[in-house]
Image (cartoon, rainbow, N blue to C red):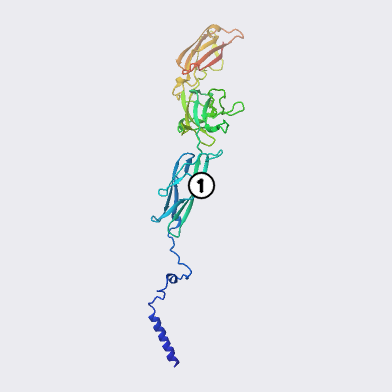
Amino acid sequence: MKKIIVGSLALLFVAGCHGGMDQDPLKDQPDNVRKGVPPNEKPKEDRNPVPRDAMRLEVEPEVVSLVEGQEGQFTIKADILGFDKEEYTVEIKNLPEGAVFDQATGKVNWTPVTDMVIGDDYMETYQLIVQMSTLKKPIMSIVRKVPIFIQRDAIRPEIVKVHLPNEVQEGREIQFTVQVRDVDSTDGTLHRFREPHLTVVQTEDTARDGSHLVRLMPSTRDNPNPRRLDPADPTYDPNLWIYTLRVDARNKELTTSRENFKFGLIATSRFGLPSAEGGVPSKPKAVSVAIVSKTPKPLTSWPDEVVEFKANEQTTFTWDVFSPLGGLSFRSSPEGDGDLEDPQVLETCAEGLPGVAKCSCAKAEPWRYHCRMTWTPPTAEPGKDEFNVAFRVVNRGRFRPTDKETSEFLKKVKIVP
């Protein structure tokens, strides 16, 4: 009897399971029950597929620099990489007063107020906070702080004039002055802030660089550098500064009679603004200086040893006087070394020597004379066998007639048996 009952129950169980295999027991249940959400909770929405790393906020230009009182413009660019159709918004959390932000184009127009930069600073930094957010929930956002550099509305210094001679002679040094006007060096009550800074720099023409030849003179209590004009001067300008500089060509050796060198000048205000011309920022002011070869002292080939002449015999001795650089082949313009004047015999020779003597010089080149001494001395008296022969030579500059160098020579001759 038990076996019959158990078998019947098993048969009913199998039949019941087989009949319900194709049925969904949650078919008619609400969504929260189907998703396993308790009745007191709402089902979760789909996850936003936009990753935060794909969201981009950029500013153009990369460095935004504006000037007090002048309207400037920059652009905020937003994008979601790989999600071109995804919608988003861009918002500036701290848009400064007076600035206008066009969300359609991303352009920001702003005229910073005057006196935004205070004190002795030249620049102020304003941190612009920009937020980008997706419209699709859950909302994804990124925030970027954009530094906006606000420059002081300052006038740049200007190099007004350079008082430099036309030329500097090789082996010498000269001083010259530079005038710089800087309206930010004083205020309206003529209170002095700080004078501009003058710097000597190289120019683009490095082959003719002469910046190493120029330097600022040191400043002392008695001779301040820079200095101002005397207030009693009718041309006095409280914003005009006069600098004293020096061109040093003492160690400069030229290979031609004249060479031009260039150097640059930059005047910098207390705010770090480099000089400008006509209010427009410019390259360093290029200055040219000509260095001309010096007129050298004449030399002679007459040796320092005593020149001997035999008694009662006619003897001829020859020597040269010359400009030491005139005949060098590497000098392209040897005529720049000057012209020798006729050598002058100062003592002895034809008149002071015993016997028959004659001294003469003939020009061989503008920079060279050939000289000769012909002498037939008598037998020397005891203790009177040595005599002096002196002569003077003048080398005069061809391009500068007032530039001349003189050499005087004293040589000895001796009568020997």
Q: Nearer the viewer, residue 226 or 290?
A: 226
Viewport quadrant of the N terminus: bottom left
* Vertical placement of residue 42 versus 70, above or below: below
Query: In x, y percent, where is residue 248?
Result: 53, 26
Q: Amino acid at mark 1?
A: Gln
* Vertical placement of residue 92 versus 260, above or below: below
| Label 1 residue SS | strand
Viewport quadrant of the C terminus: top right
Q: Nearer the viewer, residue 400 or 220?
A: 220
* Vertical placement of residue 276 versus 76, above or below: above
Q: Nearer the viewer, residue 26 or 214?
A: 26
Query: In x, y percent, where is residue 305?
Result: 56, 17
* Vertical placement of residue 231 versus 128, above or below: above
Q: Residue furthest bottom?
A: 1
Q: Within 10 angstroms of label 1, few (less than 14), some, or many (20 or more) residues?
A: some
Residue at image location 38% in from the left, 81% down from the top: 19
For the question of whether residue 12 can be seen, the reply is yes
What residue is disc 1 on?
127
For the question of whether residue 248 can be seen, the reply is no
Q: Report how many numbered discs are placed on residues in the image.
A: 1
Query: In x, y percent, where is residue 68?
Result: 49, 39
Query: In x, y percent, where is residue 394?
Result: 51, 15
